């Protein structure tokens, strides 16, 4: 029975939405449902809460309203068992793959609604919810694999012991990893699988080779589960946790897998196997495989090195834990500070340390592991109780986030208004009530997690072994540096001795050298963590050499976390380190507890910038202050990216927001000064149009500004200005544009703001700097090439006078909605893509922009969809690539599976490009990328290591190119 429900804000509107979703129920079914609601008011309120708070769940009701009736009329556990049995029965009985896929999708859809309502209504607790989600995933994997094995048996390729149980003794085992393996799946989780086989055990026909056979079976399994059809999909499948995914097949022989882990298995792979469980195929083989891996996962001695390794893994996700302020809007409840991952790492670290000697600690489930750690006195009962309560709360939040749109996301809404709605969906009366409950848990988790690593043997234990006398290298020091991983300890020691001898100008004073001497052990250990200690030390040497004074050294001495953060920046983002070295005062902002809070919004940026600019006495001082403001904000955004506290996906918006604020501020001031000098033209209006990355809010640290300046004035009035130095119409606005561009681009003592590109204006370089709106409209309507309309899909007005903004937007909207020949459009775009490939090449997959299936393909496809369909579907018009693709899916202009691939690809490319622009100012991963940069890229791509990222990138680009060619070639014919 249901006992809980969300807080409903507008019951009438929710009731109307629910009524529309139930329209297809027969009268007798509606009567039965009303009777259930009358008998169980909590069930009615839970369903109304779904109608108000979860478009995805409401769509599950609308697409088949009888589902809701079946679910509410049955005990949830019993109904779930019936659903699972029905799906499995179809998969074993049918010979039609389409029928099997349909049965699995119907099982998943009804189970998704059932489990959500049981969760929301309090009929299932968290353990029951995650177990139910995991049972459905198990059943889906088993059902799909059983169908494929039976199909192979019917074709004579597999000779099973029992046709009614084709998986029995088949020689292939599917191992569930992560939350699936631990029976802790979240509501919209991918499932991580590793597929292994034993060629000696497999009952294959004589002419069948094991490797290609089982690879084909595995690919078929993935297709049956994640391909989106008219019935939706079952599960997203990830096979990238297998050994060396960039160079291995999707199914591996057991011997090859075991050999890999024996030779080079990493700590994160040990941690992953804590949760491993055979779920389908030859279960005996799967159990034997995991038994053979026990020595790899569980070391016989107390493994304190695991603390350092797991903490390093956590730092790759979130490098800076020194502040207690936790944001609410936009917070990632999985990866953010105080989140689910910190609880899991807290548990897994101690399991890895002691699990080799104490088998009772080897449980895969987080809450059971907390109990075991308490029983064996590794943690106090209070710690167990607080982490257990926080885990239950945070997992519930995670599930509600994912129920909203069936999206694999862990981030809370970013606006306060959206948070109000989400808080009610969680059952809280207001955003503030929910925020208080959330922050309390996050801070509690953060405290326990930090305490675990504070109790660990500190790297400062190296202090006694690190001595840097001025005359010669110390032997013990060289040995200690070698243990840290320095390939050339003597050279490393020489660099540090040079620092302590006062070589760099910032270290001339005795106090500065004393500060440095105290942080050297931690700095060396932190630099070594990046994977290339020698290269990192050279970067640190450049940093200290460029440092103009000792100010930053005092801060580093007082704040060990700042030392670690600086090491992360120097190893992974040296360009950012160079900026900090030139302007060490920027590091002050990093010590502000509010630094890792919510990013400043446009209003707060405008307030701060206006205060700075209004205090300047001259134009030159204004320009200097604008440049320093931009540099400081760029550093703060960059440090957030490097430290993992700002997802790269949101960095593009942050950079664009900053650029818009600066452009608007300078636009107002340049216009005011210009009018002082030249007077006004009657009816004169100007607008700045953002194009390219700025228009799409996808800027990076190295982005230029693509701008178009438009104007208009009263044609009936005198075209000349009324000032002391009058100018005529076109000349007046061209001169103003020149002034604005100078304000943005001129090099002052404080550097440059941005590079500005005006070439997207009509007639490009040969046209006037500013364009009259009427001329712009005529050109776009009658003369513009296809590529110019593609560029215009990203146009946004970011600065304008009065009502002129609306007039400009109307012109752009009219251009977007004008009728087009789709065949000509598709052919033009294909021709452009081929020309770019011929000029730039497309064979390097690490050239994220130009590679076949890379960023250009995704952007061109989105722009095609806008231009081809905006006439009939104006709501598809948007400036951001990912949002265009989402609109296209919702409007049925793009297949759901294609949209899913393209949106994830768009995010992947943008995330990695943010890191690259920050680190090396390129969209190409250099062949000699440092281990630290590779680790930062893997983290941005949400992969455990660079090899897994490489496999993911290859797979993504292949899928994107196939979709690009299929859609555009179909459009061109």
Image (tube, rainbow, N blue to C red):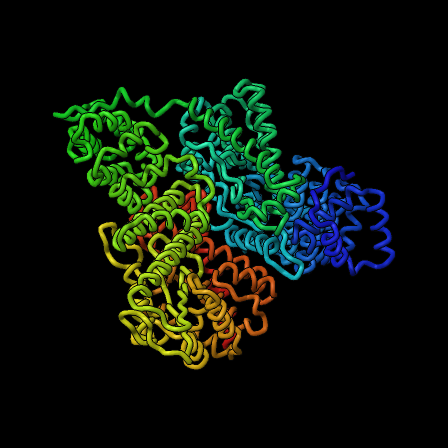
Q: Looking at the image, which is closer to me, 864 or 818?
A: 818
Residue 439's image quarter?
top right
- Classify residue 767 as left or right of residue 823: left
How far across and how far down the image is residue 812, in percent?
48, 71
What residue appears at the point 58 percent right and 19 percent down from the top-left corner? 375
Q: Looking at the image, which is closer to me, 540 or 433?
A: 433
What residue appears at the point 44 percent right and 69 percent down from the top-left corner? 792
Q: Looking at the image, which is closer to me, 962 or 374?
A: 374
How far across and how far down the image is residue 179, in percent?
57, 39
- Classify residue 862 as left or right of residue 85: left
Q: State whether residue 230 appears in this view.
A: yes
- Classify residue 493 as left or right of residue 377: left
Q: Looking at the image, which is closer to me, 431 or 517?
A: 431
What residue appears at the point 73 percent right and 44 percent down from the top-left corner? 46
Number of numbered callouts drawn: 0
- Classify residue 485 as left or right of residue 95: left
How far across and how far down the image is residue 374, in percent?
57, 21
Residue 138's image quarter?
top right
Q: State whether residue 970 appears in this view.
A: no
* Residue furthest to the left: 471
Q: Is residue 626 above or below residue 671?
A: above
How far across and how far down the image is residue 834, in percent?
39, 71
Where's the N terminus, which quadrant?
Answer: top right
Q: Is residue 782 above or below residue 682?
A: below
What residue appears at the point 48 percent right and 61 percent down from the top-left corner? 881
Residue 742's image quarter?
bottom left
């Amino acid at each position: 029975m249901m006992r809980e429900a969300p807080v409903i804000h507008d019951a009438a509107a929710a009731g109307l939405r629910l009524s529309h979703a139930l329209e297809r129920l027969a009268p007798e079914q509606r009567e039965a449902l009303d009777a259930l609601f009358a008998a169980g008011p909590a069930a009615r309120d839970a369903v109304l809460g779904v109608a108000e708070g979860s478009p995805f769940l409401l769509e599950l009701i609308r697409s088949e309203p009888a589902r809701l009736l079946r679910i509410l009329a049955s005990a949830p556990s019993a109904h779930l068992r019936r659903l699972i049995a029905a799906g499995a029965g179809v998969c074993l009985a049918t010979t039609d793959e389409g029928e099997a896929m349909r049965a699995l999708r119907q099982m998943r859809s009804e189970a998704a609604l059932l489990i959500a309502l049981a969760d929301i209504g309090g009929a299932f607790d968290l353990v029951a919810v995650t177990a139910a989600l995991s049972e459905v995933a198990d059943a889906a994997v088993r059902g799909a694999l059983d169908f494929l094995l039976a199909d192979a048996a019917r074709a004579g390729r597999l000779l099973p012991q029992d046709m009614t149980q084709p998986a029995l003794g088949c020689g292939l085992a599917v191992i569930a990893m992560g939350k699936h393996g631990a029976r802790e799946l979240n509501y919209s989780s991918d499932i991580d699988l590793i597929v292994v086989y034993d060629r000696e055990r497999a009952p294959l026909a004589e002419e069948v080779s094991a490797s290609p056979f089982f690879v084909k079976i595995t690919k078929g399994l993935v297709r049956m589960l994640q391909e989106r059809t008219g019935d939706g999909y079952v599960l997203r499948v990830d096979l990238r946790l297998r050994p060396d995914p960039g160079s291995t097949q999707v199914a591996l022989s057991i011997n090859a897998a075991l050999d890999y882990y024996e030779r080079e298995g990493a700590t994160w792979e040990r941690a992953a196997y804590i949760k491993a469980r055979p779920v389908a195929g030859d279960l005996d083989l799967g159990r034997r495989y995991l038994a053979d891996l026990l020595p790899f996962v569980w070391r016989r001695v107390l493994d304190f090195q695991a603390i350092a390794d797991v903490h390093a893994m956590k730092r790759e996700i979130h490098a800076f834990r020194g502040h207690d302020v936790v944001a609410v809007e936009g917070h990632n409840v999985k990866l953010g500070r105080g989140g689910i991952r910190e609880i899991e790492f807290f548990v897994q670290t101690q399991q890895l340390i002691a699990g080799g000697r104490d088998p009772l600690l080897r449980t895969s489930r987080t809450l059971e592991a907390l109990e075991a750690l308490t029983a064996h006195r590794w943690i106090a009962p209070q710690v167990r109780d607080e982490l257990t309560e926080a885990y239950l709360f945070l997992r519930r939040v995670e599930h509600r986030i994912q129920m909203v749109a069936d999206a694999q996301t862990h981030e809370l809404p970013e606006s306060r208004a959206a948070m109000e709605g989400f808080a009610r969906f969680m059952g809280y009366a207001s955003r503030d009530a929910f925020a208080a409950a959330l922050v309390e848990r996050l801070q509690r988790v953060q405290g326990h997690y930090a305490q675990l690593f504070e109790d660990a043997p500190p790297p400062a234990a190296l202090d006694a072994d690190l001595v840097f006398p001025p005359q010669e290298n110390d032997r013990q020091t060289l040995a200690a540096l070698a243990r840290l991983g320095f390939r050339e300890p003597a050279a490393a020691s020489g660099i540090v001795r040079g620092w302590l001898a006062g070589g760099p100008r910032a270290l001339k004073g005795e106090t500065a050298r004393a500060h440095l001497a105290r942080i050297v052990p931690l700095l060396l250990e932190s630099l070594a963590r990046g994977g290339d200690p020698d290269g990192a030390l050279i970067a640190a040497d450049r940093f200290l050499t460029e440092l103009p004074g000792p100010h930053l050294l005092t801060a580093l001495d007082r704040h060990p976390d700042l030392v670690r953060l600086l090491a992360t920046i120097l190893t992974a983002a040296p360009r950012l380190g160079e900026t900090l070295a030139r302007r060490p005062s920027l590091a002050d902002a990093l010590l502000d507890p509010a630094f890792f809070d919510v990013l400043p919004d446009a209003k707060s940026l405008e307030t701060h910038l206006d205060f700075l600019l209004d205090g300047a006495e001259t134009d030159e001082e204004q320009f200097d202050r604008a440049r320093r403001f931009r540099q400081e904000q760029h550093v703060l955004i960059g440090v957030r990216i490097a430290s993992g506290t700002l997802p790269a996906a949101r960095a593009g918006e942050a950079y664009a927001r900053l650029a818009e604020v600066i452009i608007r501020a300078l636009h107002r001031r340049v216009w005011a000064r210009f009018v002082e000098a030249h007077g006004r033209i009657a009816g004169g209006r100007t607008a700045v149009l953002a194009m390219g990355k700025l228009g799409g809010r996808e800027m990076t640290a190295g982005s230029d500004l693509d701008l178009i300046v438009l104007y208009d004035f009263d044609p009936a009035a005198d075209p000349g200005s009324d000032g002391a130095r009058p100018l005529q119409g076109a000349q007046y606005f061209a001169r103003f544009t020149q002034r604005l561009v100078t304000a943005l681009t001129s090099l002052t003592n404080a550097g440059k703001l941005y590079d500005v590109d005006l070439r997207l204006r009509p007639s490009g370089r040969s046209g006037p700097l500013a364009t009259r709106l009427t001329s712009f409209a005529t050109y776009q309507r009658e003369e513009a090439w296809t590529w110019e309309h593609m560029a215009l899909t990203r146009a946004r007005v970011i600065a304008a006078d009065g009502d002129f903004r609306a007039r400009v937007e109307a012109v752009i909207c009219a251009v977007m909605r004008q009728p087009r020949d789709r065949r000509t459009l598709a052919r033009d775009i294909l021709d452009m893509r081929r020309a770019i490939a011929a000029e730039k090449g497309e064979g390097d997959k690490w050239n994220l922009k130009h590679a076949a299936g890379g960023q250009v393909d995704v952007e061109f496809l989105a722009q095609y969809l806008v231009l081809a369909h905006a006439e009939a579907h104006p709501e598809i018009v948007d400036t951001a690539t990912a949002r265009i693709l989402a609109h296209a899916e919702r409007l049925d202009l793009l297949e759901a599976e294609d949209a899913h691939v393209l949106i994830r690809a768009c995010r992947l490319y943008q995330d990695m490009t943010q890191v690259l622009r920050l680190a090396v100012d390129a969209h190409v991963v250099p062949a000699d990328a440092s281990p630290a940069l590779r680790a930062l890229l893997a983290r941005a791509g949400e992969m455990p290591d660079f090899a897994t990222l490489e496999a993911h990138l290859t797979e993504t680009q292949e899928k994107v190119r196939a979709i690009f060619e299929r859609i555009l070639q179909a459009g061109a014919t």
